[in-house]
Amino acid sequence: METLPLVIYTLMLELAVGSFVVMVITDFKGEIGGSFLITGALTSLGAAIVARWVQSSVSFKSGEALYPTDSSWSGAQSLFLNISIGALVIYNLMVLVGTVKARRVVGVIAALACIITLLTYAMLYRGDYLGGWVAPLSLFAGAASLGAVMDGMLLGHWYLVSPTMAVAPLSRINTLFFWGLVTQALLVIINIGPWANSGTTELWDKFGIFFWVRVLVGIAFPLVLAVMTWQTCKLKAHMSSTGFLYVALALVLAGEIVSRVIMFSTTVPL
């Protein structure tokens, strides 16, 4: 499949950026321990390294045949990805041996580097559809949803062994997950309206079944699970919350893969 390297690269980049930024935001309340932080940071670093490895097989200029691409941004996003990986390595070291203040300062710097990396990648595909903001918003919403559900699932395991932990961090992460999904749902509406670009014709002709997989599996069902997780958080039923987030992670991953296949095949950024 010609789109496969782009899909994998995009997925890993969204996971690395989203999970790390959500974790750094959560850390500022001081309610989560270092063991969760190192697990989350290693997850983000691993995803970023995989993205960097896959990037070597991706030609963003040749990708113009798949999606309208401003290849002038390819050098910048490659540079910032390398910077982000370096910053993530330093952050992991700060979690292990640094002070809380040093860890948080490095975390903010690394998070900004990650955000800029995703932004420069998004600029590759901004195009001119509806002012050029739909595709970038799609990538950031995907990063928010995927990153939040990953962090929520990981954090849920700490509640299973430390049931007295404050429930607020998991609830806040789940809230970010919920609003990321809502943003993605709004993007679906934007992309299938009468103002939509010409790619919607190919979407319905060749990818109709994939569209419904994207909507139902990748957005609708996870929204239901996010609401159910809210309820179980209120009840402090941590095992149920973790189970719901496990299922949600699998669904969001599937939906995100389908979304990027559609995006790079039809130019419709769902």
Image (cartoon, rainbow, N blue to C red):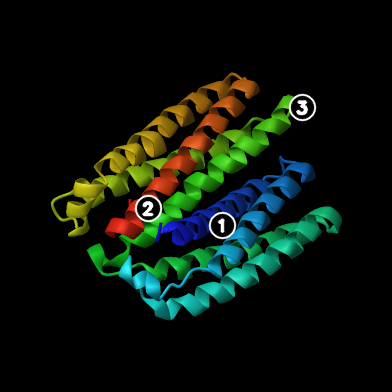
Q: Looking at the picture, how far across and down is residue 177, in whole percent?
A: 49, 41
Q: Amino acid at mark 2?
A: Val
Q: Secondary structure at mark 2?
A: helix
Q: Is residue 126 above or below residue 138?
A: below
Q: Is residue 257 left or right of residue 232?
A: left
- Alpha-carbon span between mark 3 and mark 1: 27 Å
Query: Which residue is label 2 attached to?
Result: 261
Location of mark 3 (residue): 161
Q: Is residue 126 visible?
A: yes
Drawn side of residue 177 relative to residue 192, left or right:
right
Identify the residue at image location x=39%, y=35%.
Answer: 217
Q: CA distance from mark 3 to mark 2?
A: 39 Å
* Callout 1 amino acid: Val
Q: Position of residue 123 (x, y in %)?
A: 40, 70
Q: On screen, 142 above or below 84?
A: above
Residue lying at 52% horizontally and 30% vertically, measured from the top left = 247
Answer yes or no: is residue 105 visible.
no
Instruction: Give how far across and how far down residue 29 sits, in percent.
Output: 67, 45
Residue 12 falls in image quadrant:
bottom right
- Which tag, 3 or 1, sits closer to the chain's start? 1
The mark nearer the N terminus, 3 or 2, is: 3
Which residue is drawn at the image coordinates 60% and 38% (left, top)?
Answer: 152
Q: Nearer the viewer, residue 119 or 112?
A: 119
Is disc 3 in contact with disc 1, using a CB cutoff of under 8 Å? no
Q: Residues within 10 Å of mark 3 (few under 14, many from 20)?
A: few
The residue that mark 1 highlights is 17
In the image, farthest residue toward the left: 194
